[in-house]
Amino acid sequence: MILVVNPRGGGRDLAQHLMKTENERVEVAQLRGFIAGDLDGAFRETYAISRGTRCQQYLFSLSLNPPKDAAVEDEAFFRAADRAEAKLGLSGQPRALVFHEKRGDDGQVRRHAHAVWSRIDVEEMKAIPLPHSKRKLQDVARELYLEHGWTMPRGLAVSGEHDPRNFSLEQWQQAKRIKEDPREIKAAFADAWAVSDSKAAFAHALQERGYWLARGDKRGYVAVDHRGEVYAVAKWADVKTAAVRERLGDMEALPSLADAKIEIARTMQAKMEEFQREVRQREEREKRDAEERRAALKATQEAERREREAAAQRRAQDEERAQQARLRKGLAGLWDRIRGERKRTLERNRLEAEAAMERDQAQRQQLTAAQLAQRRAALQERAQQRKTNTAITRELREDAKVFQRMETDSEAERNARREAFKERRRTEDRPRRRGRSRDGPNLDR
């Protein structure tokens, strides 16, 4: 069911539009939460309440359009509207539901519905926000297609997200860390079935979701994922075996399970090599960036040290001038000598000079420690990068070995089956010898 949303004002125009007589039939099926008993009055009522807020688009309109040939009961429209309002956070808001029956260009009468909610929360006297409403209702529409078994429009289906051939390195690592939810697997098969109408389309849709269609040994039509796990199509798509057989046709035209696994293994080995190249390139880029950052940090720290030394020299000169200014000259200086004031001033200057030296030394050590910590942090960051890249490369090599073993085992299985088949053919083609033995013809007959 295609869901089209439209936050809007203009309640009178909307009411007139929904009640247009150009439709074959118009039915106001629900007016919930309004005092008024007609559509125009209900929307006028909502407008009057909205005047207590700053909201201009006080209505939220949703059209519910099932596929052309689908026969949809009223209850299904109500359930769809309930699900949409729950998804949007409009539960309990006043709602109108209108059914339209309209004749199309092909002469067929089709039925659809319109739901309209008030966005005004009367308790809070503010409009209910509706962020990402189109994306949220796209999820609802997709669920409705799957539940009703309708052929899903290709633009609505989720595709390509689970195909390991399309994974980035980060997605591959995440996919390995988490266990796949069986509900997601069933949804992938149901999606692929819903958007396809032939064997080729179904096989393509499955591959977009990370599964390869194959001929099973005992279970008929199966699909294989990149780990070599086998899934029965009818079971996971939740359809009848007869429907699978009708859509997919001759099972013998499908690749065998062993052939499918070989194809997967070779594809995934190539993907692992691509990931390893990506890690190597990242390591080279990080190494180059680290060298550039190290050189920039060295230059910055040298400039900081020069600036500190220059500032310390300027401050020392200022302090020395201030200390010299305390020593008076002439008769005043002679008087200071006589009464011992000059001696006390010299002692004060000496103590201040020693304190200044200790202060400068402490600041120099603080700067040295801070700069050393910066260099150590940069080295640790680079060491962690190397460690991470080495671990990822090691893991990718192990993954490649798994796919290599899958290919080897599958080829051995395929060769064994071929040899067994050839042996059966030789046995069947061998001429039967009746009535003969090593000692000559049997004369007792």
Image (cartoon, grey):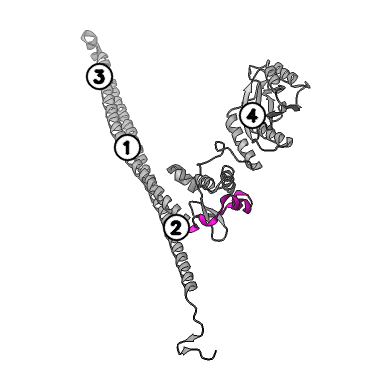
Looking at the picture, how far across and down is residue 95, in whole percent? 72, 27
Looking at the picture, how far across and down is residue 370, in whole percent? 34, 33
Which of the numbered marks, if any, corresponds to residue 290? 1
Q: Nearer the viewer, residue 73 or 137?
A: 73
Q: Nearer the viewer, residue 293 or 280?
A: 280
| Residue at numbered disc 2 | 406
> Which stretch did the figure color magenta?
231-258
Q: Earlier in the sequence, mark 1 or mark 2?
A: 1
Of circles 4 and 1, the one toward us is 4
Which of the numbered marks, if any, corresponds to residue 317? 3
Q: Is residue 329 visible?
A: yes
Spatial CA distance of label 4 from label 2 is: 56 Å
Picture residue at 62% right of the left edge, 23% below the top: 7
Quarter of the image holding residue 337? Answer: top left
Spatial CA distance of label 3 from label 1 is: 40 Å
Element at label 4: loop
